[in-house]
Image (cartoon, grey):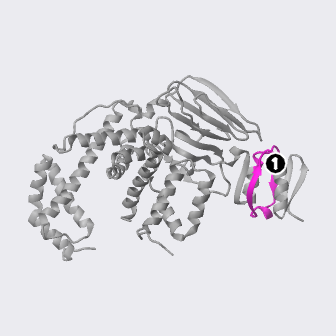
Amino acid sequence: MAISETTPLDATVVDQAIGWLVRLRFDRPDPATVQAFEQWLGQHPQHAQAWQRVATLGSEFNGLPPTLARQTLDGAKRQISRREGLKLLGLGLGASSLAWLGREHLPWPGTMADYHTAVGEQRRIVLADGSQLQLNTDSAVDVDFNPQQRQLHLRQGEILVETGADSPYSPARPFWSRTRDGYLHAQRSRFLLRELLHGTLLAVQRGSVTVFAEHGRQTPMRTLGAGEQWLFTANGPLPMANDGLDPWSWSDGVLSARQMRLGAFIDELARYRPGVLRYSPAVADLRVSGTYQLADTDEVLALLAQALPVQVRYRSRYWVTLEVAS
Amino acid sequence: MQSDTDPLTAGIGHLYREHHSWLQGWLSRRVGCRENAADLAQDVFVRLLKSERSPSLLQPRAYLSSIARGLMIDHYRRRALEQAYLDSILHLEPCLIPSEEERLVLLDALERLDRLLDRLKPRVREAFLLAQLEGLSCPQIAERLGVSRATVERDLAKALHACYRLHYGDL
């Protein structure tokens, strides 16, 4: 069963895995595609092994500052092709114009607009550049656009951003997000940011997002591509395991869980309810699967009581406990 | 551990004695600098030792010069990258210029990437950079390059195949 790093895999399977990678990483896959992929993945152990290998391909790009990397690679390529066939050493100095992203995020006294949501509330906003901004429950964000750059500042909670085309600007102005734990540069991407106790969670669904520790820092901490989620902490970035919750589901007004610990699910649900929502340790390790409407959290609790051996005790509207069913 | 008496090291030792000064001269004529040539000649033998493969003794000079040619190309590419990097940061404010350590990390990463990209045809390279570095999706790349989406998907698959071969050997 153990397959070493260098064991050749069947070429057809590798082809298939790479085909899936292209669709999942560089296209916006619809649910049917994702489902077909999962089916393929489960079909044969070799599929899973091939996927494990190909999923990390392109990691050479991780952590590179996009603009500077691009200029350097292209510049080197031009020099080499110019000098091919000639004596190659002693390459000349040629200044090229540049628009390095570090120059573009100097402070700018622009207009500020603040958006926030109450507990249980969600908002969807279309920004001036065509970007879509969604605020989850109990969240706050500042929007600061100026002629040089677009910047969001996550002050609290959780947001989902889909960057817009930014017409009539051409090229589009850089899109920055400021968080407690770093600065993010998003490239035509759909990503979410969530403040957690020990860091800021970044998940990328489409495009890529590069995280810098601070303003003006040229070497990024990491670049995340589609499908990745990391926690950025004071001590550096950590990959995040999925706890069974679809982190994007709230943007559709639901919580979608798969074999999620009930305790974690209730903690999540509690964010959408004013007051206290608790559970007894005896039920914490039960598993929850399903899609639950956030619009009515009382209904979610009632559904849980139907599906699992738990009962919901209301001491008041704002003090609710899940316990083992008697 | 290898010792002077094992056949591999002995074979390389023989090559060194017989052909080192010839190789240095060969390199010197090509790179036009005696010091660089000496370093490169040294690197050829270091690479031989590291490869742990018995050197072919049938045509030793052809063998040595082919390794030297590869090293020269690596060397030029690195120089070109360093130069292009300097061009790119030329106008940065001093406080924004990366530290020496950051610069080396970045250049090493770019060197690995450059070696990979060099294996790709121009359109494939471009599509791959747009996708991986700039985060464009297939339809966006198709529009940018004026080709069909299916072509972009094929190009990206080719680029990923090249990555795969680099990491896991030939299929």
Residue A316 among those drawn in magenta: no
Where are the magenta residues, as a range? Answer: A269-295
Point 87% across, 64% down: residue: A325
Say which of A17 and B142 sits in front: B142
Say which of B30 and A290 sits in front: A290
Point 58% across, 47% down: residue: A205
Quadrant location of the C terminus of chain A in the rendered image: bottom right
From the top left corner, tell me how far across and down residue B99 is, in percent: 38, 41
From the top left corner, tell me how far across and down residue A69 is, in percent: 39, 42
Quadrant in which residue A42 is drawn: bottom right
Judged left or right of residue A106, residue A282 is right
What residue would you read off at disc 1? A297
Chain assignment, label 1: A
**Residue B70 in sight from this viewpoint:** yes
Judged left or right of residue A136, residue B146 is left
From the top left corner, tell me how far across and down residue A149 is, in percent: 52, 29
**Residue A218 in sight from this viewpoint:** no
Q: How many marks?
A: 1
Q: Residues within 10 Å of mark 1 (few under 14, many from 20)?
A: some
Say which of B101 and A147 sits in front: A147
Residue A287 among those drawn in magenta: yes
Quadrant in which residue A85 is drawn: top left
Amino acid under label 1? Thr
Judged left or right of residue A138, residue B11 is left
Judged left or right of residue A196, residue A266 is right
Element type where label 1 sits in the image: helix
From the top left corner, tell me how far across and down residue A171 is, in percent: 46, 30
